[in-house]
Amino acid sequence: MLYGSAAGISTEPVYFTGSGGAEVHCADLDGNGLPDLYTCSYESTRRQKNSITIMFQTAPREFMPAVSINDIDMSAVDALDMNRDGVLDLIGGGADSTDLRIIYSVPAPCAADLTLDGILDFFDITLFIRMFLEERPLADLNHDGILDFFDFSVLIETFRNGCP
């Protein structure tokens, strides 16, 4: 992906990896005001079905690792508020014309669940420390553009309160 600005197109691309991305869409799926990317792959094998993948944007040009919904065999995806609750839902269509799935209320990522496994544990803390020491932008948990004690504070507070 190349970002545009008033000065022209960026020369530093942001790369997303995956297998056979057939379509890419963007919408603010987590409500933070930044467009997130969601895609659907088209390469299905016996071991890995087509998947819907979401890349949440946490700050301008900063994306969390991709989250894939691999348990369904979809070849098309779009987002729409299907149940009128104010939150976008994902609609997946399969290669079979009768296969349609709706994933209601796309879950927002939890800041402290850096491994994206749905569990707050030692592995999240270890990954945060590694990213902090490598000065990676994903360690800026309070999104102020500075890696400091306040990012550790957000991590500790989120662990204490738990993730939704």
Image: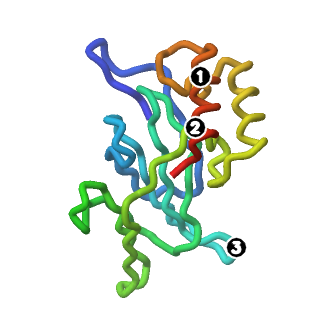
Q: Which residue is mark 2?
A: 158
> In the rendered structure, which disc, 2 or 3, sits on the residue that comes first in sequence?
3
Q: In the rendered structure, which amino acid carries the disc numbered 3?
A: Arg
> In the rendered structure, which disc, 1 or 2, sits on the residue that comes first in sequence?
1
| C-alpha span from label 1 to label 2 | 11 Å
Residue 55 in the image: above or below residue 32: below
| C-alpha span from label 2 to label 3 | 36 Å
What numbered label is drawn on residue 151?
1
Q: Residue furthest front?
A: 160
Q: Secondary structure at mark 3?
A: loop
Residue at image coords 78%, 42% = 122
Q: In the rendered structure, which amino acid carries the disc numbered 1?
A: Asp
Residue at image coords 33%, 44% = 28
Disc number lying in front (2 or 3) = 2
Do the residues under discs 1 and 2 have CB atoms within 8 angstroms? no
The image position of residue 141, as x and y in percent, is 55, 27
Residue 127 in the image: above or below residue 54: above
Q: Secondary structure at mark 1?
A: helix
Q: Which residue is mark 3?
A: 47
- Answer few, some or many: residues within 10 Å of disc 1's Cα (few below 14, many 20 plus, some between 14 and 19): some
Residue 125 in the image: above or below residue 45: above
- Answer few, some or many: residues within 10 Å of disc 2's Cα (few below 14, many 20 plus, some between 14 and 19): some
Do the residues under discs 3 and 1 have CB atoms within 8 angstroms? no
The image position of residue 43, as x and y in percent, is 56, 66
Residue at image coords 51%, 52% = 164
Disc number lying in front (3 or 1) = 1
